[in-house]
């Protein structure tokens, strides 16, 4: 990423996201939400949105603010709006969570917090969409990874609009047959657009670029990559038709949804094949830890998508276990694995980029200690696998125990991020030359640096 401008607010997004991941896993370990409560209970809705918005979406937005310019080879448009977007997203999430708590009856709070939170989230994500879409439109024609990101942003728009409709219906502010049908039959579509469309499709697009960059592999658009994009686009088109079918009470939504899942499996298999090709074509002899850990996440994606295409798996505890594997094995696993490299890489650019060529500087790899982190990722993925099996078995007590272990591994991995920001692993002779400004832990850069 030579000469790239560092996004001022990316690290702040990452820090807020990591905090929300800790909160979400802590709630599960404490027995809050599913499986201690029903899948549709307000407590579970709190947990789901803390993880999906607070952790995964903030993580994704922070990454896109930094890497969309890398994908398209042009500066970000409207980057100054990243800060108000972050504020709106955090305020919106807090209000939304408070509204779900009010819905549970645990605390006497006004239900109007639900649409207030939903409105703030629409505004925050609207700013994000404006920044990113303007940046993509200015760079047409788009390379393949950026087209995946564009598809993911379309899914984000659908997700937030559906979510806002749910807040109107659940709070009683809005009423009508359309909202009633949406609440009754549209929850799975909302979740699919969010987890499968916005988060997964965007992650796949960014990962195409990051994998080639970190593995020093040739950047070639293969026919299988285009086929994966087309299958993904068709699947999302079917999901939009499903929403129309639900809203207007039309039949065939179940068949269309199953067809979308099948197309998703095709796209995931093609993506997996592309990742394998990138790995084999690499110029870097030994893959670093972030790549090896990402492969486990991609394996979790393939297993989850394969099993969710089995109709018997889409009911009850089975679907909950698969969603858990998808969220924490695929999305969270990939997020933590790539953060391990991205945090070190951006810290290196921030600290040593300005003095490159003028003083001895460490390598990016000198900012991390892989031998210790390798064990932590093994513990994390092992805990995710055990938690998934516990959900399949309906063993709530065992689930809480292994989620606590998963939380401990997550905190230890996050400590590695902090150590990278503090330059703790860098040899003392190279750590802080006189000309460098030590990076902030998570506060924004004073100015954008090159």
Image (cartoon, rainbow, N blue to C red):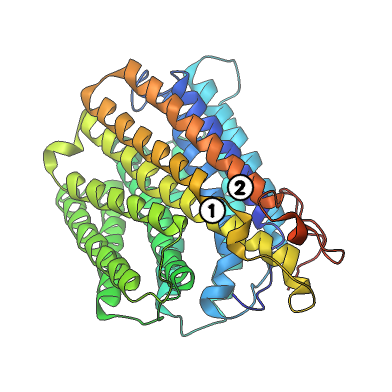
Query: Which quadrant of the view contains residue 170?
Result: top left
Which picture quadrant has residue 449? bottom right
Q: Is residue 399 left or right of residue 392?
A: right
| Residue at x 45%, y 75% (from the top left corner) | 216
Q: Nearer the viewer, residue 363 or 9?
A: 363
Q: Single out the residue that lies furthest toward the right.
A: 434
The reply to whether the C-beta atoms of the residues labelled 1 and 2 are less than 8 Å apart is: yes
Which quarter shows the C terminus?
Answer: bottom right
Q: Is residue 438 visible?
A: yes
Find residue 96 and report its image quarter: top right
Image coords of residue 85 (percent x, y) = 66, 53
The single residue placed furthest to the bottom in the displayed view is 141
Q: Is residue 228 above or below residue 323?
A: below
Residue at disc 2, secondary structure: helix
Q: Position of residue 148 (x, y in %)?
A: 40, 68
Residue 124, how many percent across, how many down? 61, 52
Q: Does label 1 or label 2 sit earlier along the sequence?
A: 1
State which quarter of the image contains the N terminus: bottom right
Is disc 2 surrounded by few (<14), some (14 to 19) or many (20+) residues within 10 Å? many
**What's the mark number on residue 339?**
1
Q: Nearer the viewer, residue 136 or 290?
A: 290
Q: Position of residue 423 (x, y in %)?
A: 70, 52
Q: What residue sits 57% from the left and 59% below the top?
A: 342
Residue, disc 2: 417
Could you tell whether 89 is left or right of 169 in the image? right
């Amino acid at each position: 990423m030579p000469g790239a401008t560092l996004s001022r607010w990316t690290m702040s997004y990452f820090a807020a996201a990591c905090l929300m991941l800790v909160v979400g896993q802590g709630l599960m370990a404490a027995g809050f939400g599913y499986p201690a409560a029903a899948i549709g209970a307000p407590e579970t809705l709190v947990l789901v949105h803390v993880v999906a918005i607070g952790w995964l979406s903030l993580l994704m937005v922070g990454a896109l603010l930094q890497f969309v310019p890398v994908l398209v080879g042009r500066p970000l448009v409207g980057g100054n709006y990243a800060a108000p977007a972050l504020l709106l997203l955090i305020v919106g999430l807090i209000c939304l969570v408070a509204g779900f708590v009010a819905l549970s009856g645990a605390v006497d709070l006004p239900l109007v917090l639900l649409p207030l939170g939903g409105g703030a989230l629409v505004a925050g994500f609207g700013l994000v969409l404006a920044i990113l879409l303007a940046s993509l439109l200015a760079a047409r024609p788009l390379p393949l990874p950026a087209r995946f990101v564009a598809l993911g942003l379309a899914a984000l728009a659908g997700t937030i609009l559906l979510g806002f409709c749910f807040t109107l219906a659940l709070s009683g502010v809005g009423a009508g047959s359309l909202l009633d049908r949406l609440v009754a039959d549209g929850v799975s579509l909302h979740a699919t657009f969010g987890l499968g469309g916005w988060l997964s499709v965007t992650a796949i697009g960014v990962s195409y670029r990051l994998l080639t960059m970190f593995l020093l592999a040739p950047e070639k658009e293969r026919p299988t990559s285009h086929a994966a994009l087309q299958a993904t686009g068709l699947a999302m088109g079917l999901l939009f038709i499903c929403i129309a079918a639900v809203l207007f009470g039309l039949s065939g939504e179940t068949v269309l949804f199953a067809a979308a899942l099948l197309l998703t499996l095709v796209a995931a298999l093609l993506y997996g094949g592309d990742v394998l090709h990138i790995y084999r074509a690499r110029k870097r002899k030994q893959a670093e830890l972030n790549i090896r850990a990402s492969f486990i996440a991609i394996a979790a994606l393939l297993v989850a998508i394969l099993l969710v295409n089995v109709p018997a798996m889409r009911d009850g505890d089975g679907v909950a276990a698969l969603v858990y594997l998808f969220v924490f094995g695929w999305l969270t696993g990939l997020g933590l694995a790539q953060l391990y490299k991205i945090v070190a890489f951006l810290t290196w650019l921030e600290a040593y980029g300005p003095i490159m060529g003028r003083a001895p500087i460490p390598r990016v790899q000198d900012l991390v200690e892989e031998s210790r982190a390798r064990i932590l990722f093994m513990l994390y993925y092992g805990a995710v696998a055990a938690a998934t099996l516990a959900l399949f078995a309906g063993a709530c007590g065992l689930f809480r125990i292994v989620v606590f272990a998963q939380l401990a591994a997550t905190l230890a991995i996050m400590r590695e991020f902090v150590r990278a920001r503090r330059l703790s692993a860098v040899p003392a002779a190279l750590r802080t030359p006189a000309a460098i400004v030590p990076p902030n832990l998570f506060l924004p850069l004073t100015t954008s640096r090159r």
